[in-house]
Amino acid sequence: MRATAIEFRLRMIIQIGIVFLGFWAPWLGGFDLGRRITTLEWLALEISRTGLVRFTYATPIVIVTGALAAAIGATFRVWGAAYLGYHVVHHADMQAAAVMAAGPYRFVRNPLYLGGCFMMAATSLLMPPTGALFTMVLVTVFYLRLILGEEAFLGATLGEPYRAYLGAVPRLIPSLHSHLPAAAAEPRWFTALLTEILSIGIFVTLAFFSWSFNHDTMMWGVFASFIASMVVRGFMKAPIPTCAFLVVAPAAWGLFHLSVFRSTLVGFGAALVVRACMPRKRNESAAAASE
């Protein structure tokens, strides 16, 4: 049931693949995303069919609920990332320096995964209903696998202090009061806000753009947030390949008149080629040799 080291290392790619399939829903046929009923519309329709409220009121109810879910998700993601740090949150391997018992980690052990669940729930409102169900089931199972893998790793690495932490703090349902003293940790709010542009962008999309009732506008909001998040993280980790992306993607769109989606793929491909051609750092080479 635990996630393997390869799953942990590829966790972002796996999540992107799940979300992509959720939006695509290939079992429905074709790739006409804008012509399918979304979960947002389907839920509003089903609520109105109960006779409790009319469709014109059911739709705002669903939008507000989705925006609240996105706000909760962004809050937990930013709060958790501020205390854990960018390099730990996005590291390819599991990290275990010490027990983190500051900020949200005093109330719940996995605020990032909890926030991710809320963020995915909000995003799934823009998918077809079966795609939303597919995404939420697979993401929930995948997060649980990651959590179990991390708990096993941290327990083996940190020993008794971490086992005591397991008994004091719930895994996913936050407690209202913490029995742990606040650990000395300095939150990095600005870095957390930058690296969580995606979760913030999803909130903005649901809270503001969804009132246009234009599926394309909402999709562009999510897509732009995703690209902005990748660019910011790229500058923090690999600035040269990121610059290659920022040059090649607009050129593919402007000079060769490719679609934005294809231009983005071309840009990502160029960034991967540049990164592969760059000399590897000593610590990366040593890690690869040890594996």
Image (spheres, grey):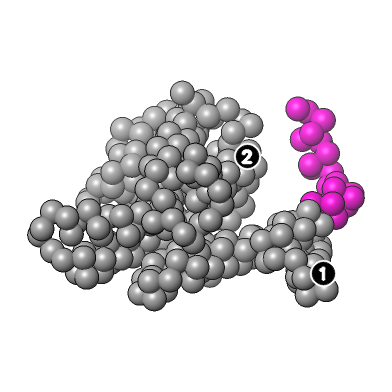
Q: Where is residue 75 shown, x and y percent of the image?
A: 38, 61
Q: Where is residue 129 shown, x and y percent of the image?
A: 37, 48
Q: Residue at x 59, y 33 (%)?
A: 7
- Tell me which amino acid carries mark 2: Leu
| Classed neighbour count for the residue bearing mark 1: other residues with Cα under 10 Å, few (<14), some (14–19), many (≥20) | few
Q: Residue at x 32, y 60 (%)?
A: 41
Q: Identify the image quadrant of residue 56.
A: bottom left
209 on left or right of 291: left
Q: Earlier in the sequence, mark 1 or mark 2?
A: 2
Element type at mark 1: loop
Q: Residue at x 77, y 35 (%)?
A: 287
Q: Residue at x 68, y 66 (%)?
A: 260
Q: Nearer the viewer, residue 140 or 36?
A: 36
Residue 114 can be seen, yes or no: no
112 on left or right of 93: left
Residue indicated by mark 1 = 256
User: What whole-number distance in Å separates the C-alpha atoms at marks 1 and 2?
Assistant: 32 Å
| Classed neighbour count for the residue bearing mark 2: other residues with Cα under 10 Å, few (<14), some (14–19), many (≥20) | few
Q: Where is residue 9 shown, x and y percent of the image?
A: 63, 38
45 on left or right of 238: left
Q: Main secondary structure of the magenta part?
A: helix
The magenta segment is: 271-291
Nearest to the eye among marks 1 and 2: give it.
Answer: 1
Q: Nearer the viewer, residue 129 or 15?
A: 129
The verdict on residue 286 being magenta is yes
The verdict on residue 99 being magenta is no
If the image is split into quadrants, where does the C terminus sit? top right
Residue indicated by mark 2 = 10
Q: Identify the image quadrant of residue 39.
A: bottom left
- Tell me which amino acid carries mark 1: Phe
Residue farthest along the left direction in this orientation: 52
Element type at mark 2: loop
